[in-house]
Image (cartoon, rainbow, N blue to C red):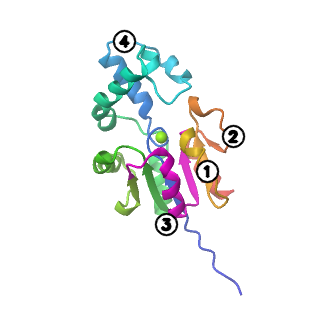
Amino acid sequence: MKQLRDTTMKFGFDIDDTLISLREHAFHIYNKNLNQSVSIDVFHEIEKVEIHEAFGLTAEQGSNMWKSTLEEIYYTSCPTYPNAVETLVELNKQGHEIYYITARPSEHGERTKQWMIEQGFPIQDDRFFCGMKDQDKVQIIQELKLDYYFDDKPDVLNTLSDDSLKVYVMNQSYNQHLTIPRITNWSELKEIINN
Ligand SMILES: [Mg+2]
């Protein structure tokens, strides 16, 4: 018997440094607030997720700097990556399910969701997950039975190995060693789905 194929798929996205350019935004804020002028070339060569070393900060100073600047980093003018909004709007229009899974602290969940909506991302309340640890994302991703998941962080991606899930890494200077499929611009997503 011929079966109709259900073409609705579930897409999961990390937010920071997957859909939006958060570290680079933070890099500019650090320069400003620390009265430094570290070149953006330095930023592009950082092989760690953390950016504090470029400013001569210790791990502890860096952690304090991040925490004390978090409001400014999260809720000002962080750029979205090229074609990110348009691509997700299109997916949503096609009837696919879009999930956001971010390890931002849970107290930032509601405001982050609002900020993302203001940028134009299609968001449904029950498809927005916030406040888990990096290594706990895997449970949510499995429970949701996603078809695709996108993230930038090696610590997250290394926990995901599931035959039914297609995992992609968002290209960043600190994840070059990962051998899983890579996306460098959101305009590539259409082709990925079609293949
Ligand atoms: Mg991220």
The Cα atoms of the two marked residues, 2 and 4, are separated by 35 Å
Q: Residue at x 38, y 51 (%)?
A: 130
Badge nearest the viewer, 3 or 2 = 2
* Residue 173 percent location from the top left of the image: 57, 29
Judged left or right of residue 70, residue 146 is: right
Q: Earlier in the sequence, mark 3 or mark 4?
A: 4
The Cα atoms of the two marked residues, 3 and 2, are separated by 31 Å
Q: Residue at x 38, y 43 (%)?
A: 104
* Residue 80 percent location from the top left of the image: 42, 39
- The residue that label 1 is drawn on is 167
Nearest the eye: 152 or 84: 152
Judged left or right of residue 117, residue 45 is: right
Q: Earlier in the sequence, mark 3 or mark 1?
A: 3
- Quadrant for the C terminus in the image: bottom right
Q: Provide the residue span drawn in magenta.
A: 130-153
Q: Ligand 1 near label 1 (Cβ, under 8 Å)?
A: no
The Cα atoms of the two marked residues, 3 and 4, are separated by 47 Å
Report helix, strand or loop for mark 3. loop
Report helix, strand or loop for mark 4. loop
Badge nearest the viewer, 3 or 1 = 1
Q: Earlier in the sequence, mark 2 or mark 4?
A: 4
